[in-house]
Image (spheres, rainbow, N blue to C red):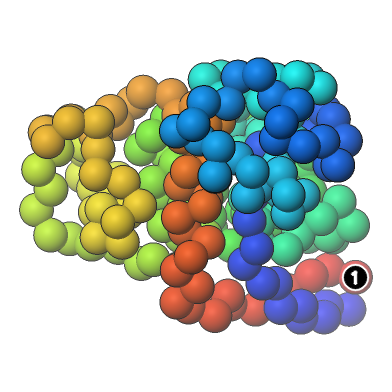
Amino acid sequence: MKKKITVALAAGVLAFTMSASTSLAAFTDVSPRYEKEVNYLISNNYAHGLTSTTFGTTNSIKRIDAAVMVARALGFSESSNLPDAGFTDVPKSRAWAVNALASRDVISGKTATKFGASDTMTRNEMARVIAIAYGMGTSLDPLPFTDVNQRFAPYVGALVQNDITQGKSPTKFGAVDPITRGEFAIFIYKSEGLSKIEPPEVEEVS
């Protein structure tokens, strides 16, 4: 029997290797550029550090870690029970997150059976995930960035339109560059302030 659950937008979790009570002051690698955003995630129990003293600000995010982060941002948890997405490279302990996002078309695999769990997430991929997860829609306006292909242009455009990012330069978005944990903290923090669209209902298999 299926029952519908409504999931609310909250925020992301960037990793889960330390206690949620850890304060920002404990991290030695968070510069003033990221302090407000990282503190927001940590204080709301949305993000954890890589160790007791490092947030991993300049570390690239793996696709599986991003999936967990966004799934929790949408209100899903380990107890969520959704259809298996069919990816063979996703650790069992994190399959709930990938299944949840796949059910919402927030994220997709590299192939029908491979999620690319250990691959780093690119800025292009991040744009798609953030735009869909936070209900920003798409933007088809011409972009100034010469490195964004047609597949991701609508999502990058949505982030630019919503003042989430302006790119790495006037003409470069850094489309295939890996996104860092510090950058993702900024994007989540900014996206949290939008709250423009009610999250859709999803079906949970009981």
Query: Tag 1: residue type?
Result: Ser
In the rendered view, does 202 fall on the left or right side of 149? right
Image-quadrant location for residue 86? top right
Q: Give the residue drawn at x 41%, y 49%.
A: 128
Instruction: Tell me: residue 5, above or below residue 183.
Output: below
Image coordinates for residue 82, horizontal then vertical, percent: 78, 60
Quarter in which the C terminus is drawn: bottom right
Residue hosting label 1: 206
Q: Give the residue drawn at x 17%, y 60%.
A: 140
Q: Give the residue drawn at x 24%, y 44%.
A: 166
In the rendered view, does 151 fall on the left or right side of 129? left
Image coordinates for residue 55, horizontal then vertical, percent: 67, 26
Q: Specify few, some or many for label 1: CA neighbours under 10 Å numbering under 14, 14-19, or 20 or more.
A: few
Say if residue 158 shows up in the picture: no
Which of the two residues, 23 or 90, is positioned nearer the viewer here? 23
Image coordinates for residue 8, horizontal then vertical, percent: 67, 72
Say if residue 5 shows up in the picture: yes
What element does badge 1 sit on? Answer: loop
Quarter in which the N terminus is drawn: bottom right
In the rendered view, does 202 fall on the left or right side of 111? right
Q: Give the residue drawn at x 58%, y 77%.
A: 200
